[in-house]
Image: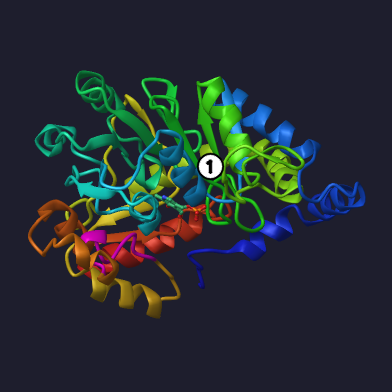
Amino acid sequence: MQIKYVDLNKDYNFNKKKLLKIIDKTLSTGEWVGGKEINLFEKNIAAYTKSKFAVALNSGTDALTLSLHLLGVKRGDEVITTPNSFIASTAAIVHLGAVPVFVDVLDDQNINPDLVKAKITKKTKAIMPVHLTGRMSNMIEIMKIAKEFNLKVVEDAAQAIGSKLCNKHAGTYGDFGCFSAHPLKNLNAMGDSGYLVTSSLKYAVRAKKLINHGMKKRGIVEEFGYVSRMDNLQAAILNFKLKDLNKIIRIRRNNAKLYNQFLNKDYVQTPNNDQKYFDTYHTYVIKVDKRDSLKKYLEKKGISTSIHYPTPIHLQPAAHKLNLKLGDFPNTEKQSKRILTLPINQYLKKKELLYISNMINKFYE
Ligand SMILES: Cc1ncc(COP(=O)(O)O)c(C=O)c1O
């Protein structure tokens, strides 16, 4: 059996005819930059996440940068976040001249709220929790701290469209929710795309202006902006794909349930389960001893896996100037050696999940 970790060909072929029709129809309108599909996507996402406003963007990274910009984060400010994210969350902070201040994580790989207060200084402007794997951070506790210390909150929900905590959507607890629609995400465009949600009309209006060079209307530039618009074509694709999102989430949750049944818990730590959290399994991450040997063994058995992320951000060469070292964030560092991401996409069959699980169990037994 050959099981790919990512199979975008399958994703394309599943809806090929319909997608080609949508692409043709959208391009034929002549609306390539800007267009009706974008406005519709913003309405659709706001309705889906039960937020007031959504802004369509060209990436999740730009959603993060723009949110921090709108909150007035600037040179010298500090933003609290985690060191075990995709590099983009920290990069967005750095690009605004601010300093990322890391807080270690819990067993579910998300920010440990108990460690946040100790990191707050006079310079702290915002907290950026990351909802890694499609499991939300403990936003109840994060919002309590933010309120107490008058801090802004930007949720990195890049991996968490549709995830909930106490029935409330990822991205709707903080001032901004930032999402990626990169091809590997549960709601995926056919290229780079992203979006943000907010309950503030003021921020939404200014965001729409900033992503279009800061232009109020053609010829009038009110402030220097960015080029962060979503293409009309990607918006049309996302409007179509959004209709299937709940089904995709249901299948991924069921795949996770099957892994939880099949994997031998004597050797494999499966993801945390908690009734308060509705997890969408952008990734399914197990924790194991001898991770690297297991990865190689699975490769030989035709199973490709991944690691999110093998090097914590504070240990990346790019973070050299932050003067952080091995030992500063023990949970993150320990997890980076033990985590392994198994294939969980919606096209996997039960027999494939069973095969993967059996191979893992066999490796240890
Ligand atoms: C946690 C996290 N933050 C931010 C991003 C950035 O999103 P994008 O690739 O759309 O810029 C990603 C994308 O993988 C991510 O996983």
**Rendered image quadrant of residue 145:** top left
Mark 1 closeness class: few <14, some 14–19, many ≥20 residues within 10 Å: some
Q: Nearer the viewer, residue 348 or 108?
A: 108
According to the image, label 1 marks what residue? Answer: 251
As drawn, 285 above or below 244: below
The C terminus - image quarter: bottom left
Tag 1's secondary structure? helix
The residue under label 1 is which amino acid type? Answer: Ile
Q: Image point 25% across, 64% down: which residue? A: 319
Q: Image point 65% across, 44% down: which residue? A: 212
| Residue furthest bottom as drawn | 300
The answer to whether residue 46 is left or right of residue 356 is right
What main secondary structure does the magenta stretch of the protein show?
Answer: loop
Q: Image point 65% across, 38% down: which residue? A: 242
Q: Position of residue 142 (x, y in %)?
A: 25, 28
As drawn, 271 above or below 362: above
Q: Which residues are magenta?
A: 306-316
Q: Image point 32% across, 78% down: which residue? A: 296
Q: Position of residue 247 (x, y in %)?
A: 60, 37
Decide if residue 263 is in sight here.
no
Q: Nearer the viewer, residue 158 or 152?
A: 152
Q: What colour-coding does the image apply?
A: rainbow
The answer to whether residue 242 is left or right of residue 49 is right
**Rendered image quadrant of residue 243:** top right
Q: Position of residue 276 (x, y in %)?
A: 32, 24
In the image, is residue 274 part of the stretch drawn in magenta?
no
As drawn, 178 above or below 341: above
Decide if residue 128 is in sight here.
yes
Q: Position of residue 71 (x, y in %)?
A: 40, 33
Confirm if mark 1 falls within 8 A of ligand 1.
no
